[in-house]
Each structure stands twice: as C-alpha cells, then as structure tokens.
Image: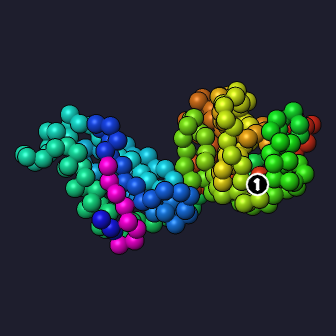
Amino acid sequence: MTNPVLPYRIFPLGDSAITVDFGAGINEAINKEVLNRFYQLQLEPLPGMTEASPAYSSFTVYYNVIAASKIVPAGKTVFDWMKQQLVEFLEKPAKENPVEGKLISIPVCYEDEFAPDLQQAASAKQLSTGELVQIHLSREYKVYMLGFLPGFAYMGEVDERIVTGRKPQPVTVAAGSVGIAGKQTGIYPVSSPGGWQIIGRTPVKLFDKEKDNPVLLNAGDRIRFYSISRHEFENY
C-alpha cells in the first residue's frame, strides 16, 4: 500500500487508536512527512478523532470508540472505518506546514559534576572529553519527536564519532541533563530514571506545568547547544 510519496502500513494501537507507519529509523524526509500529516490533522481532524501524535517515522490517531460507533456504516468495525478514512487521507498530498520550527540555542555545562558519563563515553570513542564536547557542539539538531517524559525531545543525529549505546541499567538522572543514546541526543526535562549517557546539563527549564504552554521544545524545532561554565550555570 503506497501513497504518492512514501510506502506505509496501518495497524491498530490498542482498541481506540490507529497508527500509520512509514518505516523504521531516523530519516528527515520521513519525519517531515509525519509532521506535515500531523499539521494537516490539526486543521482537518478526521470524524471520530480525538487527537493525533507524531513520532520519528509514524503518527497515531486516537478516536472515541463510542462516539465513532454511532456514525460508522452498518457492517463495518470502528477500526475498519478509521482505516478507510486514513487511506483516503493519505492518498491526497500532505499539506506543507507553513510555520518552520524555531531555532533555539540552549546552554550546557559540560563540567564533571554535571557530566557523570562524559569521561567514559569519550574514552570508549578514543577521544578526549574536550573533543567529544566540541563534536557535540558542532552541529544543529532537529527535534524529531517528543515522548518518554513531558517535554523530552528526541533530537538527531549526532556525529558518527560520538554515537554511544545506552547504559545496561537505568540510573536516576537530574532534570536538565543532556545525554546521548545511539544517534540521538536529548535533554531530561525532569528528574527521572534513564539510560542515556549524560555528558552535561542545562539550566534551561524544558517543562513548566505552571505555563499555558508547559513544553519549551516541539517537533520540528532545531537546537544549537553552546558551552557555559559552572559559574554561568549557577547564575543563569
């Protein structure tokens, strides 16, 4: 089954959601398609839909089974009806999101007390800690999706020279911690168990439940990190 641009498959996610998957992995062209489709669904929600959420290479549509069952044609299940709507939706070209993601600069302190895994991660790659930090700072990262925690942004891709595996067991990670896992980099918005390799910490608050818009970063944003000292961190 294909749309004019990308192959996809559709499958149920529980009994009140349906996922459209364009393939595995981190791919900017696929993620752009996902975000454009997500944008379109915000403008033109499908009948019965309650919300949608984007991921790296897929998006999920949630629906109200009871409400939808009242308008589903006789002889069809709610899932089959939602799937048919999505097939028709995907046959049309995606609407381009006219609003580009924001470019956001985020300060990071890479000093030892904020970077418990920096030395080990650098040694594993036969780099000095300074070299790993400079490589991490050297590029702009796209926010591909949010998940895991409120406001946790999955960003990529890191330079191949610093691709680093997750820890075998999760540990407690402080809010603001900047980590690497595989080809991804990300920031823990709140204190949480986690398995990413922590190489620094930002004083920026990524999630603030007191704000009308509690999440700082959104899918499609682009991030630049810059290095700050301990003094700058403490007085940010």
Report which quarter residue 93 is drawn in.
bottom left
Q: Position of residue 80 (x, y in %)?
A: 20, 49
Nearer the observer, 116 or 33 = 116
Q: From this viewpoint, is residue 94 visible?
A: yes
Q: Residue at x 25, y 62 (%)?
A: 88
According to the image, label 1 marks what residue?
Answer: 162
Label 1: state its secondary structure: helix
Q: Which residue lies furthest to the bottom in this view?
A: 4
Position of residue 119 in the picture relative to residue 218 (left or right): right
Quarter holding the N terminus is bottom left
- Total numbered labels placed on residues in the image: 1
Q: Residue at x 71, y 53 (%)?
A: 163
Q: How packed is label 1: few (under 14 Cα within 10 Å), some, or many (20 or more)?
A: many
Q: Where is residue 230 in the image (x, y as percent from the top left)?
A: 90, 37
Nearer the observer, 129 or 88 = 129
**Label 1 sits on what residue type?**
Ile
Position of residue 12 in the picture relative to residue 96 (left or right): left
The part of the chain drawn in magenta is 4-11
Q: Which residue is drawn at 72% across and 49% down?
A: 164
